[in-house]
Each structure stands twice: as structure tokens, then as C-alpha cells.
Image (tube, rainbow, N blue to C red):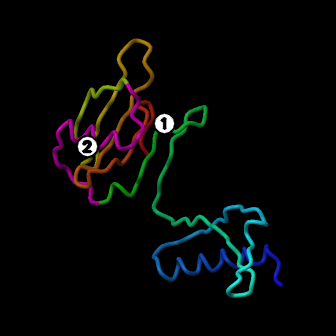
Amino acid sequence: MVDLDTLQKKALEDCLAFAEQHLSGEFRAEPVLVAPEDALSWDSVELRYVVDQTAILYRRYSQFEVVLDADDRVVGYVDHDKWEKCRWEPLSDGEALTIARSSGLLRLGLRLVESRKGEGDCLELRFEEPGPNAAPGLTVRINPVRRAVISVLPADVEAP
């Protein structure tokens, strides 16, 4: 009988080969750790042991940058893929706010203070917190045609 580690590695290789054969892109498979007693079971119909190996399959998507603060919390990101087919198209403040909120990074209390045409024909929104001790605001760039967030960055950070 082949040892469990060898069988689990073979299962990962098969998973990766299957993904590359049937899907497009560059993939990586990572095993989900399972206790040995849960990974191997007897199949009474086939009269053999069966290995159960769960894996997470990753596909390279595009260049995506994440901005962290000093405490390693996510405070912004840039999704370079969203620049594709960017073309100016006017959006109402309501539409723009709905798209910006889809990023999940707009803090409560932020208010829209500026909406303008930005570089590369994007829609650029500037948000600030009211009050004298307010945290830095956010700059959100939106691709108006795709209705997608290109970037969310703290106002004091330059876009790459």
C-alpha cells in the first residue's frame, strides 16, 4: 500500500492537472490539512482505501495591490485590471456612492466632498470625515463604463 503523504500529493497533482486542462489561467493548489484518520477511508464496494484530499485552488487573476496601515489592517487597494476599457461617462452621486460602497472600505461617517473626472478618464471621488480630529479621508477611483472600483486609497497616499 502507498503511504498517505504520497497519495495526498498525487491527489493535489491530479487536481492541478484537471484545472489546467479544463480552465484557462495559471493555477496553484494548496492542501487543506485533514487528520490522517479522516483522510483515509475504506470503500466497501470497491474493496479499497480511498483518500479524501481537499484543496484550495488559486488562479492568477491580475495585478492587485493592497495598502496596509501600521497595524497591518487593510486601508485601501488598487485593482489594475479595472483600468481596462476605462472611458469617461457621467455618473450620478448616488450611482457613484453605491459603486464605491461595494469596495467594503468606506468607513461610517465619511461624506462625499468632491466628485470629478480623474486621470485616465476615471471618476474620482474624495471622502472626508467631519470634525477637527478626523482620520484621513479616502480617494476612490471608479471606471464609469464598467461601474467598477479601480482603487480605494487613503487621501494622503499617492496612487501607483
Q: Which of pointers 1 and 2 lies earlier in the amino acid sequence?
A: 1
Position of 46 relative to 121 (above/below) = below
For the point 38% across and 32% down, which residue is it? Answer: 138
Above/below status of 145 relative to 132: below
Quadrant where the image shows the N terminus? bottom right
Quadrant of residue 53 within the rendered picture: bottom right
Instruction: Provide the residue designation for mark 2.
Output: 123
Q: Position of residue 105 (x, y in %)?
A: 42, 37
Q: Position of residue 73 (x, y in %)?
A: 56, 36
| Extreme-bottom residue of the structure | 46
Tell me the tag on residue 75.
1
> In the rendered image, which quarter is residue 92 located in?
top left
Q: Is residue 56 left or right of residue 120?
A: right
Say which of 34 and 71 sits in front.
Answer: 34
At 56% across and 67% down in the image, what residue appears?
Answer: 57
- Observer-nearest residue: 73 or 154? 73
Residue at 71 percent of width and 61 percent of height: 33
- Is residue 50 rendered to the left or right of residue 145? right
Residue type, numbered disc 1: Val
Most common secondary structure along the magenta stretch: loop
Front disc: 1 or 2: 1
Q: Tell me where residue 97 appears, x and y as whole percent.
A: 27, 37
* Amino acid beneath label 2: Leu
Q: Is residue 131 left or right of residue 23?
A: left
Element marked by disc 2: strand
Callout 1–callout 2 Cβ contact below 8 Å:
no
Mark 2, Cα crowd under 10 Å, few <14 / some 14-19 / many 20+, is: many
C-alpha span from label 1 to label 2 = 20 Å
Left/right of residue 6 with respect to residue 12 in the rendered view: right
Q: Which residues are magenta?
A: 85-108
